[in-house]
Amino acid sequence: MGFTERCAEARAEIERLDDFLVVHHYDADGLCGGALTVAALEMMGKNYNRQCYRKLSPKEINEIKSAHEKNIIMVDFGAGAVEELEGIEKNIIIIDHHQGNESSILQVNPMHFGINGSYEMSGASCAYFTFGIRELAPIGIVGAVGDMQAPFIGWNHKMLEEAESAGVARHYTDLCMFGRVSRPLVPFLMYSIDPYLPGLSGNEQNIISFYEELGIELKRGDKWRRYTDLSEDERKTLSSALVALIYEKGMKHHAKHLLGEVYELLTYPENTEMRDASEFSTLLNACGRHDKPDVGVDVLLKREGAYERARNLLEMHRRMLRGGIEYAGTHVVDLGLFYFVDARGVIEDGLIGVVAGMLYGTVGTDKPILAIALDNEGKVKISTRATKELVNKGINLGKALNVSCEGIGMGGGHTIAAGATIEIEHLNTFLKRFGEEIEKQLDK
Ligand SMILES: [Mn+2]
């Protein structure tokens, strides 16, 4: 049996049943997977309830167990918890793209069919293929973009092609910074944090002169222009000027964030974050991170009033992020082997990693960055970031954190980005060990 047959099997099972509880993950992909599933259930005329979780610990498993609905659909998680889920006496269908084993539970998972769930199919794209309803493809696209799977290959690309042939989405290569669709030209650059634009981000006067020099008018009549209102030539002028600026400031590793494949969702309103898959996923992440996942799902389902609420959450999110970056930029200290930011009590633990990564717009790229914050249990959350050049020189942050945490906490991750959590009283030991390990790695 292939993946497509498994999708058909799950669809037939769902068609046969009624009274569902849809349980899904809280990140952008999870929200999309959940929204797509309930939209499909509605089209099939099924009764359902929906529940979003951050994780699947025994507490959540118990809640699922005692739910009054007869049938459960798990989306964007569940693959890693099949043993626990097997103990539940209900029909369960798992739609997930994470690693895990086959079991007696009906599971639609690309990983079990030799399809890479990290690169070519997200939880939402998996839900899209499960139901096979083309009008819902835009939701799958947002989920896959939210899971960092753009530019699309393999099955994601197939989903995109189906969406394009149904006239619900289109794609092209363009400047892909946040706000290209939803913001007028000045705030578009003013609030750019990914990438941070030295001399422009946060500086209105500089931005106005920047556009003036490029000969780009900010207004047509009394209407403020957006990036998507610009002519082909103006777009090219602006994107090359931004690439040049980034190179000039020695931040060429940020240039890749400037241009990329963009996905326009034709079933959502123009000139809003919802029109662009990447902006939409940012909007959804803001909802999920600030404990309002239902608002995100409602936006995807076009429920009245949801978009306005999501916009407020996004503005708050970006204010916090900008505040965090400003704080980190002015409080970073050079500890010799790495840069250090102590943001305990100032920056939320959920944002500290993003802030640490963006600090490379401010400090040199010659050493790793380590930033700390407090989590809601009072523990120290550690985030580290490096550059490709540092990794080439031997830096492996995942290993460094793993070694430094031995006996005092949990840590690990990728070579270029990694995280850890430790108790406060071990902070000095940790920092000392981390410095030693970095020195060792650079020595080799
Ligand atoms: Mn996912």
Image (cartoon, rainbow, N blue to C red):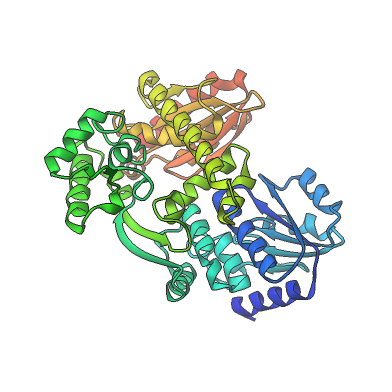
On the question of residue 59 being in view, the answer is yes
Please tell me which residue lies in front, 234 or 219: 219
The residue depicted at 20 percent of the width and 58 percent of the height is 232
Quadrant in which residue 437 is drawn: top left
Quadrant in which residue 70 is drawn: bottom right
Q: Position of residue 59 (x, y in %)?
A: 79, 43
The residue depicted at 22 percent of the width and 49 percent of the height is 239
The residue depicted at 30 percent of the width and 60 percent of the height is 173
Q: Where is residue 209 in the image (x, y as percent from the top left)?
A: 16, 34
Q: Where is residue 11 in the image (x, y as percent from the top left)?
A: 69, 74
Image quarter hosting the N terminus = bottom right
Residue sticking out furthest to the front: 221
Image quarter hosting the C terminus = top left
- Compared to 134, does 369 lie above or below? above
On the question of residue 98 being in view, the answer is no
Q: Position of residue 263 (x, y in %)?
A: 40, 60
With 139 as the anchor, is 388 left or right in this view?
left
**Count of numbered circles on the image:** 0
With 231 as the anchor, is 141 left or right in this view?
right
The residue depicted at 43 percent of the width and 73 percent of the height is 161
- Compared to 276, does 397 lie above or below? above
